[in-house]
Image: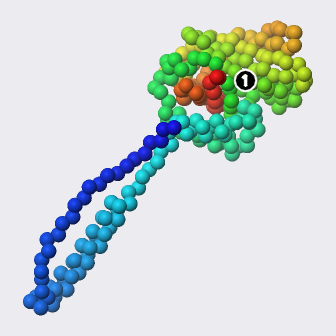
């Protein structure tokens, strides 16, 4: 775990020329002035020594610490469903700090490819649509949400669930990824495919989403949708 710090090294030397001055040989006014100046120099010297001996060290939080903090905040939250508004704000704050460490032009980074667990979304219905709505969750218990990105331009979304407490199923989308600029991508999905038990069929229409990649590394990927939804993806083992 990398933590950056700042250190301050100050080398100082102080020397004073000792001069014997006998107050008996000097006018009283000059003697008092000399003593006052000596005390003033002593106080200034004390302040300098104090500042040198007690440097302030600023500790910075690195990306690994932020990733650990972020994952701990979204753990066991059903993709963000069970978090309070205040907890959502904390997640957004940590994500905002983490994106400062993002590589330049993340859309060109090969680390975006692979399979990812969708561990958090600030709008829980964004991944999974109606299956993740308040009513949908009464009938469909989400088991996992996965996004796969295959080189060069294929995106696979899948939400697996248990329907009515005993039927296993999933809904999946396959789309084509288009790069819009150094951070934004567009994905045009084919109609969704639903599997419940032995049933399998497609329904609905094509759909389109836009996502800004704000951070990516070997472990984690962050994205912000065109409507402001924050996504946290964790690479699957």
Colouring scheme applied when the structure was drawn: rainbow
> Which residue is disc 1 drawn over?
145
**The C terminus, quarter of image:** top right
**Residue toward you, 60 or 122:** 60
Residue 198 image-quadrant placement: top right
Q: Position of residue 231 (x, y in %)?
A: 64, 29
Q: Is residue 96 above or below residue 144?
A: below
Q: Position of residue 166 (x, y in %)?
A: 90, 22
84 to the left or right of 219: right
Pointer 1: residues within 10 angstroms few (<14), some, or many (20+)? Answer: many
**Residue toward you, 63 or 89:** 63
Asked whether the viewer can see residue 95, the reply is no
Residue at the image point whose x is 58% and y is 27% from the top: 219
Q: Residue furthest left?
A: 25
Residue at the image point whose x is 70% and y is 10% from the top: 190
Q: Is residue 67 above or below residue 109?
A: below
Residue at the image point whose x is 74% and y is 36% from the top: 77
Q: Secondary structure beneath disc 1?
A: strand
Q: Position of residue 107 (x, y in %)?
A: 52, 20
Residue 93 image-quadrant placement: top right
129 to the left or right of 113: right
Residue at the image point whose x is 44% and y is 50% from the top: 58
Residue 116 image-quadrant placement: top right
Q: Is residue 56 above or below residue 41?
A: above
Asked whether the viewer can see residue 39, the reply is yes
210 to the left or right of 43: right
Q: Is residue 112 above or below residue 201?
A: below
**Residue toward you, 160 or 187:** 160
**Residue toward you, 117 or 92:** 117
Q: Position of residue 26 (x, y in %)?
A: 10, 88
């Amino acid at each position: 775990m990398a933590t950056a710090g700042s250190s301050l090294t100050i080398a100082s030397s102080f020397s004073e020329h000792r001069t014997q001055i006998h107050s008996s040989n000097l006018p009283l006014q000059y003697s008092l002035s000399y003593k006052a100046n000596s005390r003033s120099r002593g106080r200034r010297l004390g302040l300098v020594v104090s500042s040198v001996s007690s440097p302030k060290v600023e500790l910075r939080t690195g990306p690994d610490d932020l990733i650990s903090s972020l994952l701990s905040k979204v753990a066991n939250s059903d993709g963000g469903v069970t978090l309070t508004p205040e907890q959502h704000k904390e997640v957004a704050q940590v994500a905002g700090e983490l994106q400062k460490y993002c590589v330049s032009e993340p859309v060109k980074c090969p680390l975006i490819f692979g399979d990812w667990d969708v561990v958090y979304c600030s709008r829980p219905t964004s991944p999974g649509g109606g299956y993740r709505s308040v009513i949908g969750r009464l009938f469909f218990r989400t088991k996992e949400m996965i996004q796969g990105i295959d080189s060069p331009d294929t995106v696979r979304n899948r939400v697996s669930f248990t329907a009515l407490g005993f039927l296993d199923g999933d809904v999946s989308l396959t789309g084509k990824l288009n790069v819009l600029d150094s951070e934004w991508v567009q994905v045009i999905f084919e109609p969704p495919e639903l599997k419940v038990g032995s049933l399998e069929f497609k329904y609905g229409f094509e759909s389109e989403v836009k996502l800004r990649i704000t951070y990516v590394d070997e472990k984690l990927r962050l994205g912000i949708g065109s409507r402001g939804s924050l996504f946290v993806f964790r690479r699957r083992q």
